[in-house]
Amino acid sequence: MATVTERYEHVVGIDTHARTHTYCIIDSRTGSTVDTRAFPTTAPGMQRAVSWIRRRTRGTAVLAAVEGTSSYGAGITTALLTEGIEVAEIRALYRRSRARTGKSDPLDAEAAARTALCTDVEKLAHPRRSGDRAALRVLLASRSLTDQQRTANKNALTALLRTTDVGVDARKPLTDAQISTIAAWRTGRDEPSHRIFREEARRLAKAIIEQTRSLQQNHQALSALTEALAPGLQGIPGVGAVTGAILVASYSHHGRVRSEAAFAALGGIAPLPASSGNTSRHRLSRSGDRQLNRAVDVVVRSRMSYDPATCKYVERRRAEGLSKREIRRCLKRYVCRSLFRELRTRMA
């Protein structure tokens, strides 16, 4: 297993902040500090920093160890990758040594570089790629927010119709046809109080229709991006546009998750011992990425309803005395293993 000192002649530690970044260049062969300097976070400032790195390293193999590649370090990460300089993300593990060494921006930049020097190349954390993957995460966040707002508006409209007499039977959940009818109401000739009720109902109905349209467009965009990043993934039984997008966003890129067991642990799907006395059993973890956990759960529930092979498995396990929850736990682990292999094969 190659080490950073064997592959790179210089390591640049970068301590990132809102207005300035501090850079520290370490010679991998001797461990000595070549130079330390701070540059502003503006586009010209980051270009000056890249030129400074090139001059100080004299065209040798360089690794940049950046703290916070998805926040303050996003701009310099993009600039370095554009110039062909490899980037590794350094997490805040090295902060434990501050009790002995103190803290300053140059010290933090040097600590980031020395942390990378002590790491094997295969264990370096690479930053998440931008472009389609970042767009996918934005679409998922937007969908979650829009769906929450639509649910809140539906609840508010239902409550209004049930507590005021505006001529709509709201004892059952509202249908799309009822919402469309309410959105087309005219309220000009009503009594003042009655007009207020109908205007508010119409406003809520229009908001629900607009949010439904936004969710449909979001679904189409998620489907297209997921297909571009992982061709054929949505053809797997139980995987749709939203669940596929969550799976791709959680997996992100090759190297982020080292194995299928780590992928299961990331989603809180790895079984945990829950035995006591004469009872021997396992349960699912309650930690991890809950969106990934939800996506795998949706796939499992769908297969339990429609997939013949999964239905046969469920019947066999029921005959063995397992409850429905325990069967679903077992299936989630199997499905997670299968999905990890599909993601590793299909994603570039």
Image (spheres, helix red, strand yellow):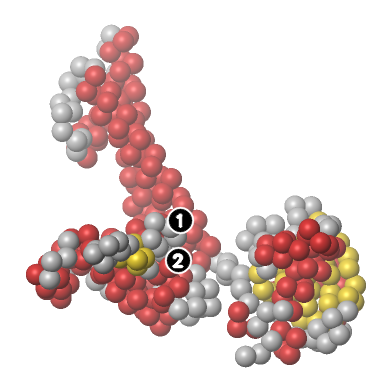
At numbered mark 1, what does the secondary structure look like: helix, strand or loop?
helix
Q: Which residue is mark 1?
A: 139
Circle 2 residue: 266
Residue 74 found in image quarter: bottom right
Residue 68: mark: none
Q: Is residue 38 visible?
A: yes
Give the quadrant of residue 293.
Answer: bottom left
Q: CA distance from mark 2 to mark 1?
A: 21 Å
Q: Residue at x 12, y 71 (%)?
A: 320
Image spot of residue 6 (x, y percent): 73, 90
Asked if residue 254 lies left or right of residue 197, the reply is right
Asked where in the image residue 116 lies, by quadrant, the reply is bottom right
SS class, disc 2: helix
- Residue at 29% in and 20% down: 198
Q: Residues within 10 Å of mark 2 (few under 14, many from 20)?
A: many
Residue 166 in percent (x, y) is at 21, 19
Q: Is residue 98 left or right of residue 139?
A: right
Identity of the amino acid at label 1? Leu
